Amino acid sequence: MQAEVDVEIELAERIARVREVIASAASRSGRRPEDVTLVAVSKTVEPERILLAARLGITHFGENRVQEAEAKILALSGRLPSATEWHLVGHLQSNKARTAVQLFSLIESVDSVSLAEILNRLGTRRGSPVPILLEVNVGGEPTKFGFAPEEMSSVLPRLLDLPMIAIRGLMTVAPAVAEAELARPYFRQLRALRDRLARENPSASLHELSMGMTGDYPVAIEEGATIVRVGRAIFGERPA
Ligand SMILES: *Cc1c(COP(=O)(O)O)cnc(C)c1O
């Protein structure tokens, strides 16, 4: 019993701390805290602790694997506030796209034209556009998924022709760096890319910039993040 209370207190303190950091970074960039959506990345976190986080006010959860998310969402069905939203933040295989469209309110990790085409077909079938972000590999790392920044000017007009996906903006996973400040150029690059794409495609609405994780989210917010994806700062270190 005491252990459970401790878990809850620790989680509450961590969430409060993250909220404070978000508020002060938002004010440094001339924005309000509510202009930044906190997505609590709950990969590897068990359903009961997700429920606790939801009771402590977390409204958005991020998962990187469809099957893991499906099992948890099923386990929590009827117990989470109805406003709870799930974002997919990891690579989506085409054979999981159908399930992903049912589970997630935003697929942040669309990283190929062929996946976008599949999601467009699924949107057509269900009769409403599928909200997505386009993942950009700003660091050009061979181990990471995402469009190359250079290809976005030619790719985006093709994707804007797909009527049953709703492209809301860009997402990136910045290279792992020793200190947050070193990630700033990557965040700046994503924002500059978004601004340029918006100029080139005036009909597009690319409001969202999903960037920043536990190690670097204050810097990402200073550079314009509208969505931060924070795991360890909320739930603690993940098992190796
Ligand atoms: C795991 C993960 C996060 C959260 O990382 P933390 O360092 O735990 O904050 C964010 N984005 C993606 C895509 C992830 O896979």
Image (cartoon, rainbow, N blue to C red):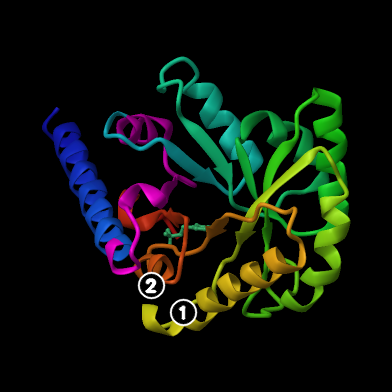
Mark 1 burial class by Cα count in 10 Å: few <14, some 14-19, many 20+: many
Q: Does the magenta stretch include residue 138?
A: no
Q: Give the range drawn in magenta.
A: 27-54
Secondary structure of the residue carrying tag 2 is helix
Using the image, tell me which numbered label, if any, was put on residue 183.
1
Tell whether 138 sits left or right of 119.
Answer: left
Q: Is residue 236 visible in the rendered structure shown here?
A: no
Residue found 40% across the figure and 22% down from its top: 81
Q: Is residue 39 magenta?
A: yes
The disc, 2 or 1, on the residue closer to the chain's N-terminal end is: 1
Q: Is residue 96 above or below residue 204?
A: above
Tell whether 216 sits left or right of 24.
Answer: right
Residue found 75% across the figure and 34% down from its top: 129
Q: Nearer the viewer's eye, disc 2 or disc 1?
A: 2
Name the residue beneath numbered marker 2: 219
Q: CA–CA distance between discs 2 and 1?
A: 8 Å
